[in-house]
Image (tube, helix red, strand yellow):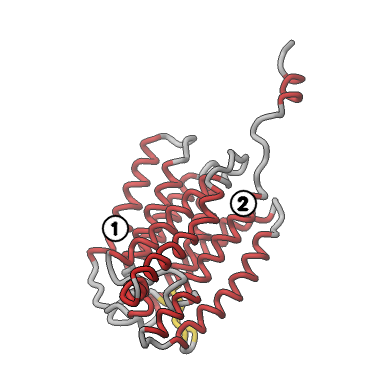
Amino acid sequence: MLLGAFVAWRSGAPIAAFAINATAAALGAGVAARIGRLSIETLPRVSGPLAVIAVLLTASTLLFPGLDGVHRWIELGPIRLHASAVAVPWVLLGMSEALHRRFAAAAVLAVGLSAVHAAQPDAGQGTAFALAASTLLARAHSTHWLQRAVSCTGVLLIGFGAWLQPDPLAAVPHVERILQLAASLSPVLGIVAVAALALLLLPAATGTGLGKTSDGLGAPLATSLFVYIAATLCVPMLGNFPVPVMGAGAGPVLGWYMATGILAASRRQLTPWRLPPCNRAITEPG
């Protein structure tokens, strides 16, 4: 965020636009710390309702006037909050919890949010979420492969369908083109900016090696969040979509902190899936 503000200042863009990033970071860090301290019983219990609320929150953007026919934001006075960027981590959490108990519920959540992305339209979030949700659905090995294949195909088609909708919004340099601004100031600064953005993947990357869990959280959730964050970093190269955290905007900042808090809490859900050698010897015949 500091690098983005510096690049904006050097490029003549309004550095005051990054005040919302700082506010979102302070709020997000507090919420993430609270999420990370949730009890082992609480996170799975609230994941489903929170996922439904997240989908409805994103769908509520369709009720606001929008910009040039594009409806991606919830308007809070002078602030436009990119709702999907905040909501996606919660939907992925709800899907992860539902997979091994109610695969249909996970598929409905994925299809529902993908449909909202197509209606907004938001091809950037639609693509990132569809890839992450498909990663989760494909790993539901307890469900028949045909169900998984149909669900993944449907989510991907609906999510990618947002690219077919008209999106006349022009890029804002300090939001969607912050990397290009950095590179234009100095090639070295551009490389540093790319490296800084790559660090956003670190919390999810460290969770992808988690073992199996009894409640479906852990490695699959971390992998889906890794795919989602990586995709949000890539889609600005394909269209006018915000660069997460480094570009001006509160939604991606809050969303990254939500994902980090969820990852911290999910690590606490881990339960051993194999008995230690001494205990296993006791339970085995002979």
- What's the mark number on residue 110? none
Place residue 138 in its image quadrant.
top left
* Element carrying mark 2: helix
* Element carrying mark 1: helix
**Of callouts 2 and 1, the N-terminal one:** 1
Question: Number of marks in the image?
Answer: 2
Q: Residue at x 57, y 44 (%)?
A: 216
- Residue closer to the observer: 57 or 254: 254
Q: Residue at x 69, y 58 (%)?
A: 38
> Can I make out residue 116 in this image?
no
Looking at the image, residue 207 sits to the left or right of residue 275; the answer is: left
Give residue 14's position: percent from left, percent from top.
Answer: 41, 88
Give residue 41's position: percent from left, percent from top.
Answer: 70, 51
- Residue closer to the observer: 215 or 222: 222
Q: Nearer the viewer, mark 2 or mark 1?
A: 2
Give residue 188's position: percent from left, percent from top.
Answer: 38, 68
Looking at the image, residue 4 sits to the left or right of residue 259; the answer is: left
> Can I make out residue 221 in this image?
yes
Real-space Cα distance between discs 2 and 1?
A: 29 Å
Q: Given contact means CB atoms under 8 Å apart, are the residues at marks 2 and 1 in contact? A: no
List the residue tagged with mark 1.
160
Establish if 23 lies above or below 152.
Answer: below
List the residue tagged with mark 2.
266
Image quadrant holding the C terminus, namely top right
Q: Residue at x 45, y 86 (%)?
A: 15
- Residue closer to the observer: 54 or 236: 236
Which residue type carries mark 2? Ser
Place residue 160 in its image quadrant.
bottom left
Give residue 229's position: percent from left, percent from top.
Answer: 44, 59
Which residue type carries mark 1? Phe
